[in-house]
Image (tube, rainbow, N blue to C red):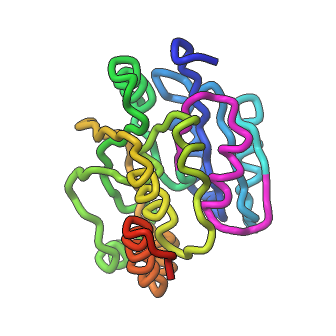
């Protein structure tokens, strides 16, 4: 594989998301630059997620693991991936159809770049009752998406940073991104909308809100590393 042959591995961590997984996979299949492979990593689902993924058996490679969290599922996907670029999509979110193509254009024109992000827009999942929508805040504006779902990264750059940590209930991506910046990786934020992030009652950030203190610990660990201390 070479930079002249941009092969993208799309990695989809799945946990009890049978209601939304089909729409997520279809958004990958609609890409104007199709991925080289789609890897669905089932993180110990107890619903019908496996059956939904297998409906796409001609396009999607399905793997499963015991329930360990989205970060561990993404790690498994990166180890299986054969592409020279990695892109991640949570099983309840949706890519805009030009996401991969737009990011590959930037890589082609700026070969020094390691990571490309894009804009994202939150939306209430249509099946939510109106009274529930009123209870769950959904920012209306398009915002910069520093999250796995907007990111494309060169595989060799990901390997320089290392795998996502599985010790955090929340914030494993923030932890990984801080390490990427500490390692000197160069990132770009596109002005283009590339991801629609679904808001529903079982979002990790909503379900595990009591673990938000992890964010403080993650930032402190990064500061300690920068100062040459052992993180506590």
Along the horizontal axis of the image, is 182 left or right of 52? left
- Residue 149 point in image, percent of width and height: 46, 48
- One can see residue 84 in this view: yes
Viewer-nearest residue: 165 or 80: 165
Based on the picture, tell me whether residue 72 belongs to the magenta stretch: yes
Residue located at (66% from left, 60% from top): 72
Q: Tally the marks.
A: 0
Q: For the view shown, which residue lies furthest in the bottom direction?
A: 210
Q: Which residues are magenta?
A: 64-89
Question: Which residue is painted at 29% across and 76% down in the image?
Answer: 134
Residue 33 rendering spot, x and y as whole percentages: 49, 21
Which residue corresponds to the image point at 32% horizontal and 80% vertical from the top-left? Answer: 135
Q: Nearer the viewer, residue 147 or 129?
A: 147
Name the residue rendered at 52%, 39% in the picture: 157
The quarter of the displayed image where residue 197 is located = bottom left
Which residue lies most toward the top here?
A: 4
| Screen quadrant of the N terminus | top right
| Residue 24 seen | no
Give the vertical position of 201 relative to 26 (above or below): below
Q: Nearer the viewer, residue 106 or 14?
A: 106
Examine the rendered structure and indicate whether residue 12 appears above or below residue 134: above
Q: Nearer the viewer, residue 189 or 11?
A: 189
Find the residue positioned furthest to the front.
228
Provide residue 24's location: percent of width, then percent of height: 54, 45
**Residue 6, image x and y in percent?**
53, 20
Task: Check if residue 75 falls in the magenta segment.
Answer: yes
Is residue 222 found left or right of 90 in the rendered image?
left
């Amino acid at each position: 594989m070479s930079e002249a042959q941009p092969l993208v591995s799309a990695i989809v961590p799945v946990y009890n998301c049978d209601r939304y997984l089909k729409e997520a996979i279809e958004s990958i299949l609609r890409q104007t630059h199709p991925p080289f492979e789609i890897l669905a990593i089932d993180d110990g689902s107890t619903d019908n997620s496996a059956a939904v993924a297998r409906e796409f058996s001609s396009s999607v490679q399905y793997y499963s693991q015991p329930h360990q969290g989205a970060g561990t599922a993404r790690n498994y996907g990166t180890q299986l991936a054969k592409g020279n670029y990695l892109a991640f999509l949570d099983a309840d979110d949706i890519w805009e159809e030009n996401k991969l193509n737009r990011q590959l254009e930037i890589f082609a024109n700026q070969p020094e770049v390691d990571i490309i992000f894009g804009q994202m827009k939150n939306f209430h999942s249509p099946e939510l009752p109106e009274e529930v929508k009123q209870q769950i805040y959904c920012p209306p504006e398009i915002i910069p998406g520093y999250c796995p779902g907007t990111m494309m990264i060169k595989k060799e750059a990901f390997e320089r940073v290392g795998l996502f940590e599985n010790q955090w209930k929340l914030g494993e991506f923030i932890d990984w991104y801080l390490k990427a910046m500490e390692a000197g990786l160069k990132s770009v934020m596109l002005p283009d909308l590339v991801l629609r992030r679904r808001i529903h009652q079982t979002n990790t950030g909503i379900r595990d809100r009591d673990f938000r203190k992890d964010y403080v610990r993650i930032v402190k660990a990064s500061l300690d590393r920068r100062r040459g201390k052992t993180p506590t």
